[in-house]
Amino acid sequence: TEMASVAQVLRSRFRGCLAAAVAGDCIGAEFEGCVPVPVDKVLGYVDHVNKQRGREVKFTDDTAMARSVARSLIECKGFDARDMATRFAKEYKREPGRGYGGSVITVFYRLLEEGLQDVFEPARQQFDGRGSYGNGGAMRVAPVALYAYGDVEKVTDIAKQTAMITHYNREGYNGAILEALAVHLALQQGKDEDLNVVQFVDALLQKMKIVEGGEAGSSQSEEPEVGQSEDSRTGQSEDTDGDQSEEEKGSKEAASSKEADQPYCAKLEIMREFLQRGNVSRIEVEDQLGNDIKALDSVPAAIFSFLHCTRSVDDIPTDNALERTIIYAISLGGDTDTIATMAGAIAGAYYGIEHVPPPWMKACEGANDAVRFADQLFCLATGETIEK
Ligand code: F2R
Ligand code: MG
Ligand code: MG
Ligand code: MG
């Protein structure tokens, strides 16, 4: 029936999301920390992965933590901060060699201490109370978008909470919110028409304006809201520069204030311009969107990779847009496993499991588990049961 096929498509998208996230992490791990990463090297490595006979391509901390997020949501049938925190810490203790971030380990040890009252306290104390701005909250968030399917408020809220267990900095947890919203939006898109990439960015911008706007001037933003003071709005500041009109100066100040107060919105606006322009070099993406371990310098690159790769890319000779997305994300260099896992989650949620190359499913450690977690989250989210 028609209903059954709608459910089948959605289930394929749940599976695609978690399986492509695993593939992005496993394949991207080969190049983590390398700059630049020539696309030919990535294509060569993908050939090598495709020839593997067993599960030789290992996942890293990105997947290890995403598995804990999925398992916790499934076992608790909802978000339980303490359960999830304990899973993160125990998983680290079980396999500490997965390539975790340098500082998050301190949080894990504190989470394992007896008598801990508040599970968010260790994260709050990171970096002298500023919290981590790393991408560790965002890299593992995809299962949240599946679990909270259909309820954007729930996606936002749980994404923030799961991130805050380790990442108390505003940039850290807002990056997780943005990544979760991108997966959420990808799941909602119809597949009959070509994706309108600019509209996709605008939808994210609309949400992130509320997320970041609601927090401007909060205790964590160190600068006062310069751009919104009476002086700068009217352009009546003291130093009058002859070369610039008052209007020009006002808009420059507004732009730099936006960078400080609404940094994700500022990057989404750059992304919008890139997508409208079309021919954007990797250097520009690295320079303007970023490719490093900060959430602010990697979540935008992941979203851009997905959107840019809905169309063909000159130096990536494949017709499979999901495969193209992961190869492109890795070729941006820097935090390649993490950018590729986040791009993969979004692409998988859009294209579905049929687009994840079978040799990747075979070679990547944890790919089959991802399908199982996706099915369990699908049942929780939709109330559907799955006939085997
Ligand atoms: N750790 C890595 N890669 C490097 C080594 C891996 C190597 N392949 C190996 O085999 O060992 N990758 C993983 O880490 C990233 C996620 O990190 P997460 O979870 O955000 O960790 P953390 O420790 O919270 O933050 C990372 C670093 O960012 C800097 N930092 C964060 N907040 C800061 C702040 N407020 N002030 C100053 N610095 C801050 C620190 O240097 C942190 O150590 C992913 O790439 C994952 O793949
Ligand atoms: Mg990693
Ligand atoms: Mg982490
Ligand atoms: Mg990484």
Image (tube, grey):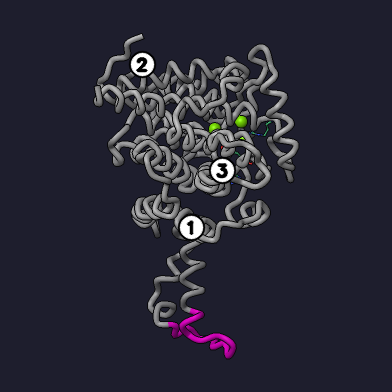
Q: Quarter of the image holding residue 156?
A: top left
Seen from the viewer's position, the closer of residues 157 and 270 is: 270
Q: Look at mark 1 in the image and give the residue it sits on.
A: 272
N-terminal of the two: label 1 or label 3? 3
Q: Name the residue under label 3.
A: 127
User: Which amino acid, mark 2?
Assistant: Glu
- Residue at which label 2 appears: 75
Q: Is mark 1 on a helix, strand or loop?
A: helix
Where residue 51 sits: x, y (%)? 70, 19
Which secondary structure, mark 2? helix
Residue 238 is covered by the magenta coloring: yes
193 lies above or below 59: below
Which residue is painted at 39% across and 55% down in the image?
202
Looking at the rendered structure, the kind of residue marked 3 is Phe
Tell me which amino acid carries mark 1. Answer: Arg
- If the picture is divided into quarters, which one holds ligand 2? top right
Would the CB of label 3 be found within 8 Å of ligand 1? yes
Residue 129: in sight, yes or no? no
Callout 3 environment at 10 Å: few (<14), some (14 to 19), or many (20+)? few
Relative to 300, residue 357 above or below = above
Q: Where is residue 274 in the image (x, y as percent from the top left)?
A: 54, 58
Q: Do the residues labelled 1 and 3 touch (CB within 8 Å)?
A: no
**Residue range of the region highlighted in magenta in the rendering:** 235-249
